[in-house]
Amino acid sequence: MTPNDILEMFTPRIVIVENDENDAIILSRVLQHVGTGVQIHWVSSIDAFVKYARTEQLDLIISDYNLHNSSALNVLELVQQDYPGLPVIVVSHMIGEKAAVEVMKAGAKDVVNKVDYKHLTATVSKELIALRHIRERTQLRTEINNIDMERQALAKALEKVRDAEARANSLLSQLNKVFESSPDGIRVIDKDFNVLRVNANYLKFTACSENESCEGKCYDFTPREWCNTNHCALKRALGGETKIEDQIQLTGSDGDERQYVLSVSALIGQHGEVDGIVENLKDVTQWQQMQRQILHAQKMESIGQLAAGIAHEINTPTQFVGDNISFLKEGFSELVNLLNQYEATIEQVRNGEMNDALWQPLDDAKENADLDYLKEEIPQALAQSEDGIGRISSIVKAMKEFSHPGSEDAELFSVNQNIQNTVTVARNEWKYVSRVELEFGFKLPLVRGYPGEFNQTILNMIVNAAHAIEAKSSENQNWKGTISVKTYQRNGNVVVEIKDNAIGIPEDIQNRIFDPFFTTKGVGKGT
């Protein structure tokens, strides 16, 4: 190995401890032959050496045997104590055999004559090569240790990956079970309309075969009204909508038509982009049936609560119809007596009985009947009775239409007629505290929906308004409120506006008016 080979590994740092400057210069020049990259530093005393060694990394020391007030032995002692393993070569113009042995025992690598330059360079090269080997072995051990640590770290990481993979597989298995055992129908579609996956209930709800639903485009097998339009759920999800819902009717694998709520959620990718959609079909047929039963029960409960007032509303016209019938009965009896007297008088005239006494019974009968009074009052009694019967008929008809359970399916109905019926049924709830002003739109179209639920909603709002007016009128007994109901057509829709001038909704609960089951009424009140 050449000196340059040594320098390929590292740049040696050599310290010359020499009190003679000329000798130090000569030694430095000789050592340059070891390699051009050798760094050489000269110190003239042990103290200077100590100071320099504190700040620099040293590879080799060349020390003159004879130093001022010391010798190479002192350098060796210092090195053994503070820098063990640091090689020291002792040089001298003349050194006895005994001194040389002593120096070697003290730890010197070699003792060289100062003028034997060939020996010196050979010894230095040898020590630097040995040092390089040491460093190579140290570096190799370090690399081996690092590799071993990396191997251990990789083993631990691999174990963690295996654990994570096992947990992921377990979680995936659980998710698959949840996906397949969900009571809802679930289908996953990518952004290119390809069906990625469906569960068993989706197939059952949509009457699709497994092969059909698992392959191809979504619109080929389960077309919706929105397909190929801007209302397409996938296009809306790609446009930023995160939750889309619709109510649909499907014929299942059993041939029955059932109602479903179709919820569509955006399928979010790893970087937040929309990768597709997830369709969720929830069978709400039974729930809707139960809901209608509950609503009908609530409606009948409302009718029960209104029964006393409705009875009163019917009783009032019934009373004056009955009074008028009694009056007509008495008046008819008197008219019959008068007609009988007319017939008797006519018979006497036909028989030729013509005298002044003939007319007296007729005049008495006419006076008893009070014919002028009957001629004036009977038409009024008949008109009042007709009006009372009309009012009774109107109330009964309104009750019948209001309490009708209706069809399970949406049907066409008149908004104005249903509001009129509801106001009539609830009249006893509002008539003592307010008046109701109806402003119906002209020729409104029929609307499709559930009239029973509509009636219940209008009833609740009118009764609520009446209660609010009653609360306000308690502060001013002479004040009477107003409930106004207005209907009109706008942009193809029928609009219903209900307004009252009562106490209003407190500001601190206005944000809760659409919360389910929230109410300010006491227990047992309200619907």
Image: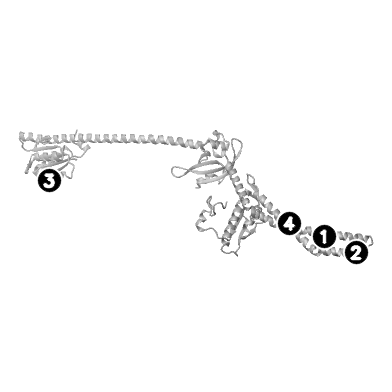
Q: Which residue is mark 1?
A: 335
Query: Of circles 3 and 4, which is in front?
Result: 4
Quarter where residue 253 is shown: top right
Question: Upstream in the sequence, badge 3 or badge 2?
Answer: 3
User: Is 221 situated left or right of 95 in this image?
Assistant: right
Image: 109 above or below 385: above
Q: How many discs appear?
A: 4
Residue lying at 63% horizontally and 50% vertically, measured from the top left: 304
The secondary structure type at the circle numbered 1 is helix
Q: Position of residue 65 (x, y in %)?
A: 8, 39
The Cα atoms of the two marked residues, 4 and 2, are separated by: 39 Å
Are dots 1 and 2 in contact, CB under 8 Å?
A: no
Q: Which residue is mark 4?
A: 322
The Cα atoms of the two marked residues, 3 and 4, are separated by: 139 Å
Question: Upstream in the sequence, badge 4 or badge 2?
Answer: 4
Q: Which residue is mark 2?
A: 358
* Nearer to the camera, 64 or 174: 174
Q: Is residue 492 visible?
A: no
Q: Amino acid at mark 1?
A: Leu
Query: Of circles 1 and 2, which is in front?
Result: 2
Q: Which residue is mark 3?
A: 48
Q: Amino acid at mark 3?
A: Ala
Q: Residues within 10 Å of mark 3 (few under 14, many from 20)?
A: few
* Nearer to the camera, 2 or 441: 441
The numbered mark at residue 22 is none
Residue lying at 24% horizontally and 36% vertically, measured from the top left: 139
Q: Amino acid at mark 2?
A: Leu
The Cα atoms of the two marked residues, 1 and 2, are separated by: 19 Å
Are dots 3 and 4 in contact, CB under 8 Å?
A: no
Q: Position of residue 452 (x, y in %)?
A: 63, 49
* Nearer to the camera, 178 or 333: 333
